[in-house]
Amino acid sequence: MEFLSAENVEKLELKKFDIKLRYGENSHEQVYIFGKPQFEVLHEGKQLSYNNILDAEAAWVLARNLTTIGGGAAVIKHQTPCGVAYLKNESEDGKIEAIKLSIQADSESSYGGILATSFPFTLEMAKALNTYLEVIVAPEFEPQAVEFLSKKKVRLIKPKEYTPYAGKVAFGSLVLSERRFEGEPELLFGTPIDIKDVKFALIVVEAVKSNAIVIVKDGVTVGIGGGQPSRKRSAWIATTLAGNNAKDAIAASDAFFPFTDGLEILINAGVKCVVAPLGSIRDEEVLSFAREKGVTFYKSPIRLFRH
Amino acid sequence: MEFLSAENVEKLELKKFDIKLRYGENSHEQVYIFGKPQFEVLHEGKQLSYNNILDAEAAWVLARNLTTIGGGAAVIKHQTPCGVAYLKNESEDGKIEAIKLSIQADSESSYGGILATSFPFTLEMAKALNTYLEVIVAPEFEPQAVEFLSKKKVRLIKPKEYTPYAGKVAFGSLVLSERRFEGEPELLFGTPIDIKDVKFALIVVEAVKSNAIVIVKDGVTVGIGGGQPSRKRSAWIATTLAGNNAKDAIAASDAFFPFTDGLEILINAGVKCVVAPLGSIRDEEVLSFAREKGVTFYKSPIRLFRH
């Protein structure tokens, strides 16, 4: 069942769903679910919470988007990614490597995080985990993996097919937006790079709360800046977290650069390729600046705000 | 009409609301509203967008919470506060001062922001604005203020009475949490400070996406860190933004300090008073650390996660 369809677009009827959750966003707050959440809970080592479900969805939408470039793994904390890695090869070892890289990408934050993989979760993967995770989300779980993990406090979630929406309750109503990620990045100037890396940076930046700046290198995130009221500030956060890893890396921005200042921070940190949508009244100034500095610039086909 | 009530707690029936919005979260995405949003649009200098409504609600809930300490003004960007000030006196000048302080608190970010005031918005306030704002939200607008502002691109929103919820669409269902802010901060040790300042810090931190750290001084925010997967990182952002203003300031944390590291960043920056909930297995270590460092510690009555 889809949340929104031709039948219910004029009137949404959502029945209360009978599930026991720990509590609302905080322990003194009640929680409710309306409609049937499109997942199966395979193991609930600790009762699911409101935040677990929202984190699991954030992680799953990101992991599902990664399938368009062959798959990968993502660790989410508080509905925002802290580490993401794409698959370099489709072997079991390649998948375990992607999981480990997504955890290590921000080892300070991944403890207690939510892991989502675009691929089935096996016993070998479960055995390879070396940090505490609140939830694991995967399209399938090997029965032996469930058995192995059922001794732990983790929750295992297997999503069903559904269409994700960006929707929130505000002013006593439900405000709902499509969440569509489509189109191809376009090289505007500079030395072309592996398009998979450009797409990867965009997939991650779509999952980060705006203003979002994401720096990736060798198929792994090295700096994620977001949740800030200024793009320049997100660039500062992302480059500071990346440190030396920003050198020759790729940076994605979820919206256009309104000024050259954010871009300058990225370039000064060593970023060699930038992907961002256009649309600023200063586009020409921003693009000239990037061209002069010798970086490669890809145009994102769409703006990628998520709040 | 309340979003949730005894009558509809078993079954939510929401009719599509007929309002023309610019577009969804991004321009290629469709937007829908279900149920009747509890506000009046007094002026729409530019068509309202999905993001405007969500930003306006974020700003309004914060401004409404400020009434518990006598009122104030808040500027929001991307659903997170960038500058907030409480009222030092209830005169017209005092209110204009609070508006100006909320804008100046983060002048880099407030351009194009959403302003909400807890008090009626007058012509004098409209004339005193010296930055571009996307939306102004207030409990009342003086007709002359509406007339003056109707020549500008700003949207004016007057909320009605309603109960705010933290609710999001996830996995094809609506996950809803109460949003309750209650209780009194309790002094655990150190020199007592004006309780109004402690409450102010908590009201602002409730509105910041977690992990949230907010530094306030003289009734104005001087550093807001949030949207991060680690509390330590938010402390780093808040103290960096505060700079010298962190000296003798008050810091609020939306959840407990899991380690002493985040607290140490705040204390090293000069913060003299900390307010945070407890609940960590390392509470004793964290509190001992704060006591040794000579800071005042207030216990927040509740955790204040908002994502």
Image (cartoon, coloured by chain):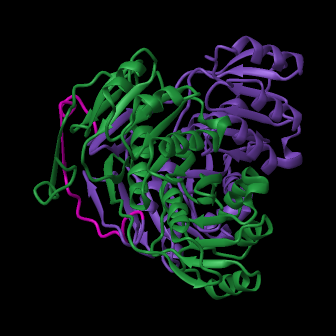
Chain colours: A green, B purple
From the viewer's side, name the closer residue of A209 and B140. Answer: A209
Which residue is depicted at the point 73% across and 60% down?
A: A246
Q: Tell me which segment is drawn in magenta.
A: B2-25
Q: Is residue B288 left or right of residue B214?
A: right
Q: Would residue A82 be visible to someone looking at this image?
A: yes
Residue A177 to residue B304: above or below: below
Q: Which secondary structure dominates the residues rendered in magenta?
A: loop
Tell me which corner region of the image, top left, top right, bottom left or bottom right, holds residue A247: bottom right
Q: Position of residue A192 (x, y in %)?
A: 60, 79
Tell me which corner region of the image, top left, top right, bottom left or bottom right, holds residue B239: top right
Q: Would residue B194 be visible to someone looking at this image?
A: no
From the viewer's side, name the closer residue of B153 and B175. Answer: B175
Q: Is residue A266 magenta?
A: no
Which residue is depicted at the point 60% across and 30% down?
A: A111
Residue A93 to residue B79: above or below: above
Q: Position of residue B284 (x, y in %)?
A: 73, 11
Residue B66 to residue B141: above or below: above
Q: Is residue B24 magenta?
A: yes
Q: Position of residue B278 (x, y in %)?
A: 64, 18
From the viewer's side, name the closer residue of A119 and B47. Answer: A119
